[in-house]
Image: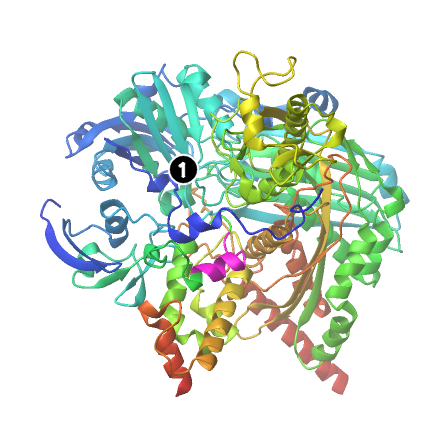
Amino acid sequence: MTQRVAIELTVNGRPVRAEVEPRLLLADFLRDHLELTGTHLGCEHGVCGACTVLLDGDPVRSCLALAVQANGTHVETVESLTQEDGSLHPIQQAFADHHALQCGFCTPGFLMTVRGIFDDLPGMTEAQIREAVSGNLCRCTGYANIVRAVQQLQRDLQLQAVRDPATRSGSRVDDRGALRDTARSEVK
Amino acid sequence: MATYVGSNYRRKEDYRLLTGKSEFVADMKLHGMLEVAFVRSMHAHAEIAVDGTEALKMPGVHAVLTARDLAGVVGPLNPLEEFRLPQDLIDTIHPVLLPCPEDILAVDKVVYAGQPIAMVIAENRYLAEDAAARVLVKYTPLPVLADPFRAREPGAPPIHPAMGSNVQASLHVEVGDVERGMAEADCLLKRRFVVPRVTANPLETRGVLADYDRRSDSLTVWTSTQVTFMVRSNIAKLLDIPEEKVRVVAPDVGGGFGTKGGVYPEEIAIAYAARRLGRPVKWIEDRMEHMQSCRQSRDQVHEVEVAFNRDGRILALKDEFVVDSGAYNPLLVTCPYNTVAHMRGMFKIPNFAIAGACVITNKTPSIAYRGAGRPEAVFVMDRLIQIISRELGLDPVEVMEVNLIRPEEMPYDQGMYYRDGTKLVYDSGDYPATLHHALELAEYDRYRALQRERRSEGEYIGIGISSYIEGTGIGPFEGAVIRVDATGQIVAYIGSTPHGQSHETTLSQICADEFGVSPEQVTVRAGDTSLLPYGVGTFASRGAVTAGSAVQVASQKLREKMMRIASHTLEIPVEDLEMRDGKVFARQMPGRSMSFRDIARAARPGPNPARPADLEPGVEATHYFVPPSVTYSGGVHVAVVRLDKDTGQIDIIRYVVVHDCGRVLNPMVVDGQIQGGVAQGLGEAMYEQIVHDEQGQLLTGTYMDYLQPTAMEVPDVIQGHSTFLSTRNAMGVKGVGEGGAISPPAAIANAVSDALSMIGIEVNEVPVTPVKVLQYCREADARMRLAAAEGAR
């Protein structure tokens, strides 16, 4: 308990060094130590998905991961989505456009889950989208508008790919490479 | 002028929630803050002896508090004033209501598994939990009463000895002459219906942070609640301090659905601890605690007799029901009386007798959950409609039609009282039209034909219909203070406490229309008892009706005052002035105008005020809206389902809701409320159930055991709107929060029963889980094979 472990990781693009108890949850590390409280704890047993963050690009439940397990990784939280000037990421914008949130507690988890499947979105069916977000529980919206938001995003990405198949710049999320990769896979 | 009311105005709440800038109680951190872990009972009924000395020696521990520390200092929780029946109703129906106070921390014995026994306060939650494991609780088990039917037997030992009985509350309502109705009818039948215990499960658990300010000797308590004012009055009362010294704030709240619509022992305990230790103290409930200790709902068993004629007309309905209230019943008869008042729904049933009893058992205490007694009533009534139709060889639609209240009969008097003590009179609606609209959207005839066609191919398709009415916008009141600040921004302070309902958006829309400005020029502040003197809360589908009306009328009052100030300064009569785009101007000479900022300056206190002498200083107006009675929303749900014989899943082919909530403030928000309500209702219909064993131990304590629907199970609801304005508020608004959740259990049970009508399956209990569906399908297949073999012979 008292023995602490040194960890080094990248959180939302910034290097972080800390000494933590081995038992400290990744979620608590992000929330309490780094004050990134956008990541929410809903069930603390890995079912509701509210605490979803990306670990080296893959969605993980930060309530089931320990901070020490994140040593040497790149962690992205909901706070990483918003642009420097405060403008919204297309995923966030789609959720706002389609009233895909009510109380908003589960929302960061959904956003990060969708961020995790972002590159694959253009080729997904509605059933696949529903399955992809089925690891996230929402008790307010009944999901319809969440699915609509993701489908809108999907259409935007498809359009972008058709309109702009080879360009490597000019997209709104260009710095994360998401649209670029998608465009490439569409061309194939 | 309605410019914004009725439009899909974008939610003002979203930006902070999407970007992680929101603030829920768990996100808050104060200097010197300590964290709490509760020690909770492992037994459902036992005498206890608690020893916290070992725990106190653990690292980082500041205090271990038990009932001994609270004795004589903090009183027990009693049922909330706001949920007591009005005296005229008590005098009419003479309910039995026994006092059943709830200890903040268990005193000498525990009455349900999960009851708080001790609180450990430490540097952080990790250390608090380490120490909580060292609190020694010696249990001497007592016999457990987990079954309400056993608990209510005359010889059963009372769980709370002071009550002398486990029947905490009972009530009886009679309209017409049931015996005569029974005697005159062609047919009679009896059935038993079970609506089990469920839990609301907001994604954010409960959480409380209390901060004690030594200088002013006052407390600020942030809590994830729907009812800040009730929390404040109870903290003040139980800690015996003036209300003025307690401020209760609900920051962002992650859903409530009724379960946060009460005052909890933990809220009192945390407030007490902060005051005692002189430091901020925080407790965030974990999900295990939530499943075990957060109040649960429904849990009704009905024994019903119904008398009807061969045309389907119902002459009499008699119902005796039992509510398993768990160990405490803080809302008294709120839910059972809702069941009573909503039982006949859209139907004319002249003779009606109903008796309900709330029975105390060794289970988690109960509270309202979205629908609050109405889904139970609707389940009973709509199952009966379908059973009667089958009995008579009629289509359920035919049975509904002969019993529906006709539009020309509005306002319709059901011949009894509502829970608020006023006469139960439906204000507006066209129920037959609503039904037919829903059937049309559901393509009823097409699916009836498909059902027949596919049945011969061994596919089971069923159609279930359910209708509901809902008394919404209950009083006693809700308040709004509207103010224009020095920069001309309009601020609306309201007493209700949103937790996902979009108050900041919809109330801005109302306010904006009254002042002729954009909703961006309006800020809505809510969820804080320091904003205005009185408030009630957000529950019972009351926000739009009560807070909405309060905002509207307060805005009108303020508008009038601003016009008078402008008239005074501009020396132009009020009749010749207009307010629009953030200023007041002369209609004939638009150049002569005052901005809101000018008016705010003119209204400031001081010598030689630039306002009429009889006006109070300040640009502010207050209104407390007191509804004359509730206003009745209503709707019809139709579910078309196919039973999956391999998985037992109920595939929902079509789910239709046509509903009336009067004037729609924001269609996007209303549609969202309906869709979300349906999702919760479908969970209750198909998966969700809180199960305790005979020893009162929770068997469904995780999300792996308590299944909730995901995006894969919830269909897009096909929605239709019918608008019959309320006659009980100026905007014509009716509530919509609960409607979506009321009918799905009945609609799904009817659909599954309908799919299996050839074997006479009656689904009179939910949830209809995949296991049950598989069993039904096997029986149905066997029956079909037998019939085919007989046919071949």
Q: Circle 1 is placed at which residue position? A: B44
In the visual, does B686 lie left or right of A63?
right
Q: Position of residue B181 (x, y in %)?
A: 86, 41
Q: Chain of mark 1?
A: B
Residue B579, magenta (yes or no): no
Q: Residue B321's quadrant in the figure?
A: top right
Image vertical order of residue B499 relative to residue B390, above or below:
above
Magenta-colored span:
A92-101
Asked whether the viewer can see residue B608, the reply is yes
Q: Nearer the viewer, residue A61 or B619?
A: B619
**Which quadrant, please, contains the C terminus of chain B?**
bottom right
Local crowd at mark 1 within 10 Å, few (<14), some, or many (≥20)?
A: many
Q: Residue B377's quadrant in the figure?
A: top right
For numbered disc 1, what is the local secondary structure? Answer: loop
In the visual, does B387 lie left or right of A91?
right
Q: Position of residue A46 (x, y in %)?
A: 34, 57
In the visual, does A95 lie left or right of B719?
left
Image vertical order of residue B77 relative to residue B59, above or below:
above
**In the image, what residue type sits under mark 1?**
Ala
